[in-house]
Amino acid sequence: MLQTPKHDPLKLGTLEEAISQTMNEEEYNRVIEILGRVPNVTELAIFAVMWSEHCSYKNSILELKKLPRSGGLLMTEAGAENAGLVDIGDKLAIAFKIESHNHPSAVEPFQGAATGVGGILRDVFTMGARPIAALNSLRFASLTDPHNRFLLDGVVRGIAHYGNCFGVPTVAGEICFDDLYKGNPLVNAMAVGVVHHDKIATAKASGVGNPVFYVGSRTGRDGTHGATFASAELSEDNESKRSAVQVGDPFSEKLLLEATLELAGSEALVAIQDMGAAGLTCSSCEMAAAGGVGMDLNLDLVPLRQTDIEPWEIMLSESQERMLLIAKKGFEQEILRIFHKWDLEVSEIGKVTDDGMIRLHHQGRVITEVPAWDLVLGGGAPQYAPESKRPDELDEFAAFDPLSLPIPPDHNKTLLKLLGNPEIASKEWIYQQYDHSVRTNTAIEPGRGDASVVRVEGSKKGISVKTDGNARYTRLDPFIGGTRAVAEAALNVACTGAKPVAITNCLNFGNPYKPEVFYFFKNAVAGMGEACRILETPVTGGNVSFHNETDGLPVLPTVVIGMLGLLDDASVNMSSGFKSDGDAVYLLGGASSDGLGGSSYLNFLHNKISGKIDPVDFDQLQKLIDLLVELNTKKLINSAHDVSDGGLAICLAECCLMDRNEKIGVTVDIPNGKNIIAQLFGESPGRVVVSVDHQKATEFEKAVSGMGVLIEKIGETGGDKFIWKEVLDLSLNKLSATYFSAIPDLME
């Protein structure tokens, strides 16, 4: 039984209270206008959290609307449901989405990362989809700092704990390092699931009089004001914000998954949504607004962990493993039966109404009456167009000529320095903590390919998935950086033989009210949209994370792309490592240029994020993607690996080392360009190294010429060295020792 609240939930909310909850005076006055009266403190808390940056996207939605958000294989428009939905044929669909959990991970890395995984999994299985893969994208400051090592260790353990216990394979990801992430690491989590067409669930409430059920774990105070916490920058006072971090229980989530999937597609279920950001507030308001209905909810019936929780805390709590669902009237006992079977809390807490209002009852009083439509993204929530200003320093960056730097005398040492940088080195220390083979459908595991391939049960098909992004490129030219993030993610899945079909995205930026920050965001989104239109990979949805700043210093403008590719036959795929001695090695794709702007070489060896970055040749890229899909189908190549961080030299070294137990050397002979460093370490986009059986070389070259893709034969596999004639000569043992030990040595 609820105790009498310490504070009167009907007390009028003041402007000062609104400001303390990240609202401004204009928004406070807008609430008064909507209600026709001054809101009480409970209503004010609801408006504040729903109009927070995290929930309302008020500073990003006008730019996001410019993205291609429908078409192709998409079954729902971006943002219309809990996750994006892509039709893959055979009456099956893929649900997938990515979200950030940056601020919680900065304060409490283990639980912050773990609950980020739990939240994105719920977004997928509320679609009726069984999760089949998890991915992540991580950003930290230098590991030479003990606190950064603590953050990385906690985040990796949190991801592993939740995914492994829940029983979903963590199959792919990426990690980057830069001191501009100091104090504000980025933790982006992605989940992918498969659903039969007749099992797809919706989040749109409907049916006046239908009962509303609360299911899952009980409500506590953990995560209260979590959405507000995510909508403000971090400071030295992070310790005081631990209450805004949720605590997860993957075993309860596993039960919730099975109960939800049992219910999905049944006559009993009308709609369902995860209680994620803003908890019961967001789920009730968004479901009602999506269906054009209202809800009457009785807070006395919400299962609680404590008896002294205030009404506003019940509404804003982000306790994990909870759902709100609408059942068809007359099926109440079926709902109770299913959730009791799985030993989960279930309580009928309200009903659907026809007036569009969210009405809260508490201890015999109506304490809240607010219109759902005016609270939500796409409804009455504010939409702003912040000022945008191009930073003057971008001209300085573009004017810098990387070729003016002296050429290091020993290219072997230079390669080893790059190969041993944590951003390039093997991520085995990380992914070996994840169970990437649970459910036995992982066809290409982490560390073996440019993307990971997962078989789809009930079909021959497979999916190829990858997260990718390079914030240095976006820092130097946000539009080109946005295009290159999409282009590389598309090329990654194509290198496994899959056709890129759709993306999700996580956009991590600083304070949008700073004109220079918003310039990066606005132009990066424009570049991302341009690439998606050209490649016909529409945006299924995603996440914007603003206010990634520590004491006023923003992180690098970080665009993370989650790419989905499809294979008609999951058993026919390509990994990245060389397979056998005597294979011919070719370089395919865009013509090489100096390509050192924004490169790993400049960053790691000269401590510079500078130079002009190369744009994507989309005509050549599209031909290359189509070619790789065809070559895989015809089994004409043995491996494929795109040239990205560290350039061609790093790409070739990785091809030699991808299979740690069966390393294969290579000898290449490439005519020197005007600058050997640019040739070795330049990062011109749209290039792929492939290996081909000599007996298939003629057929391979014919297929390439028919597609109009640039081709250059550069060498042959074999031996126990990586030799670039007259330039590099390194044993595979030396390369391997550097590549596989860099991160473990730093984490000791």
Image: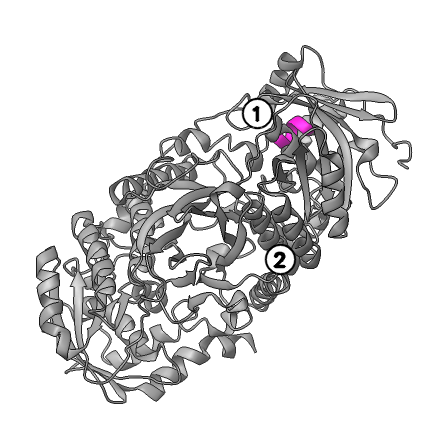
Q: In which quarter of the image is residue 700?
A: bottom left
Q: Which of 98 and 34 is in front in this view?
A: 98
Name the residue at the top extreme.
36
Sequence order check: which comes first, mark 1 or mark 2? Answer: 2
Going by the numbered disc 2, the residue's amino acid type is Ala
- Asked whether the residues under the numbered discs 1 and 2 touch, taking CB atoms below 8 Å apart as contact, a structural biologist would say no
Above or below, comparing residue 193 to residue 269 in the picture: below
Going by the numbered disc 1, the residue's amino acid type is Gly
* Residue labelled with disc 2: 114
Q: Which of 106 and 564 is in front in this view?
A: 564
| Crowd band around label 2 with a 10 angstrom C-alpha radius: few (<14), some (14–19), many (20+) | many
Which residues are the magenta region?
46-50
Q: Under tag 2, what secondary structure?
A: helix
Residue 378, position as x, y percentages in the image: 50, 26
Residue 548, position as x, y percentages in the image: 52, 46
* Residue labelled with disc 1: 291
Can residue 545 be seen in this snapshot? no
Helix, strand or loop: magenta stretch:
helix
Question: Comparing marks 1 and 2, which lies closer to the viewer?
Answer: 1
| Crowd band around label 1 with a 10 angstrom C-alpha radius: few (<14), some (14–19), many (20+) | some
Q: Under tag 1, what secondary structure?
A: helix
Alpha carbon of mark 1 to alpha carbon of mark 2: how far? 32 Å
Question: Relative to residue 199, is residue 154 drawn left or right?
Answer: right
Residue 493, position as x, y percentages in the image: 33, 58
